[in-house]
Image (cartoon, rainbow, N blue to C red):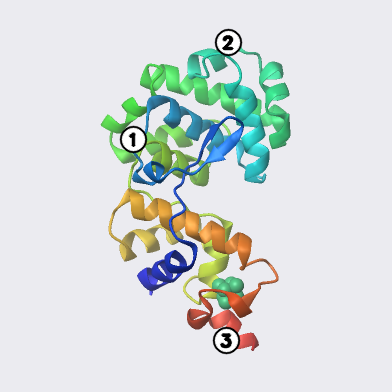
Amino acid sequence: MVLKVYDSLHEVFGYQNWWPIVENDMAIYHPDYRSCKRTSQHAFEIGVGAILTQNTAWKNVVTAIANLKNQKNFSADKLIQLSEAEIADLIRSSGYFNQKARKLKGFASFVLIEAGGDLLKLRKKKLGEVRSLLLGLWGIGPETADSIMLYALGFPIFVVDAYTRRIFSRLGVVKETVGYQEVQDFFHSALKSNPELFGEYHALLVRLGKDFCHPKPLCSDCPLRKFCTYTNAIL
Ligand code: SF4
C-alpha cells in the first residue's frame, strides 16, 4: 500500500527534486538535489530554509533566503555576526521574523560549535546523536530537525508533517491525531531505509496536499482516489 501510494504519486507528479536551492532569487529544483548529495553551503541553506518555512508558504521563504544570500558570504560565520534585529529585517517576508531570527542565530551558533562551521561534518556522527543535538536547539521540533537530517545531511529519516497525517488518515492508515513518532515509525517499517526515497515521498505528499488533499479535498481528479477510504465514504 505505502509503495503503491508512492508509485501513483510519482506517476502523476514525477520527481520533485527537493530540497530546492535559491539562485538568482528563484528556487531551483535540480535533479542532482534529490540524491541528498550536498555542498556545505547548500546544506547550510537547507537548514536555514527548514527553519524559515515553519508556518509559512515556501515562496515567502525564497524571498528571505535570497535576502540573506545577497549578503556577502552566506554562512554560519556571517550570520552569527549579524544582530537578531538585522536578521529579522532580512527575513521579514517569512513571518514570525523575530522568533525566526533568534532561531537562525541559534542554528548558526550550533553549526559553528558542533560542526566547526561545516554542517556536513555532522554526517560522521550517528543519526540519533545528531537528531538529539538539533532537537536541543530552541524552536527546532521534530519536523524541522528531520528536514535538516534528511535533506541537508542525507540521513535516512522520514519527515512527517500535517499533509502526511491528513493524507494517510484519509487513506484509512493512521488517525489524524496520531503522534509524530508513531507516523514516522510506520513509514520506517514500511519502506526501505533510503534517503532519496524518503525525500521524494515527503515532497510528493506535500504536492498532493497542496494540489488536491485540502481541508476540503478535490477528490475527483486525485491520483490516490482508488485507495482512499475518505473519498469512497463520501461518494
Ligand atoms: S481522494 Fe480526496 S481525501 Fe483521498 S487523498 Fe485524494 S484528495 Fe485526499
Q: At numbered mark 3, what does the secondary structure look like: helix, strand or loop? A: helix
Secondary structure under badge 2?
helix
Circle 1 crowding by C-alpha within 10 Å: few under 14, some 14–19, many from 20: few
State which tag comes first along the sequence, 1 or 3: 1
Residue 54, horizontal then vertical, whole percent: 62, 42
Q: Where residue 103 sits: x, y (%)?
A: 59, 28
Q: Residue at x 43, y 17 (%)?
A: 112
Location of ligand 1 given as a quarter of the image: bottom right
* Labelled disc at residue 129: 1
Q: Ligand 1 closer than 8 Å to the CB at disc 2? A: no
- Of the residues shown, which amino acid type is indicated by label 2? Gln
Of the 4 image quadrants, the one containing the N terminus is bottom left
Closer to the N terminus: mark 2 or mark 1?
2
Q: Which mark is residue 81?
A: 2
At mark 1, the secondary structure is helix
Q: Which residue bears the numbered disc 3?
A: 232
- Seen at 40% across and 38% down, the residue is 131
Q: Quadrant of residue 60?
A: top right
Of marks 2 and 1, the one in the foreground: 2
Mark 2 and mark 3 lie on one chain; the one further toward the N terminus is 2
Number of other residues with Cα within 10 Å of mark 3, as a class: few under 14, some 14 to 19, many 20 or more: few
Q: Position of residue 47 (x, y in %)?
A: 49, 33
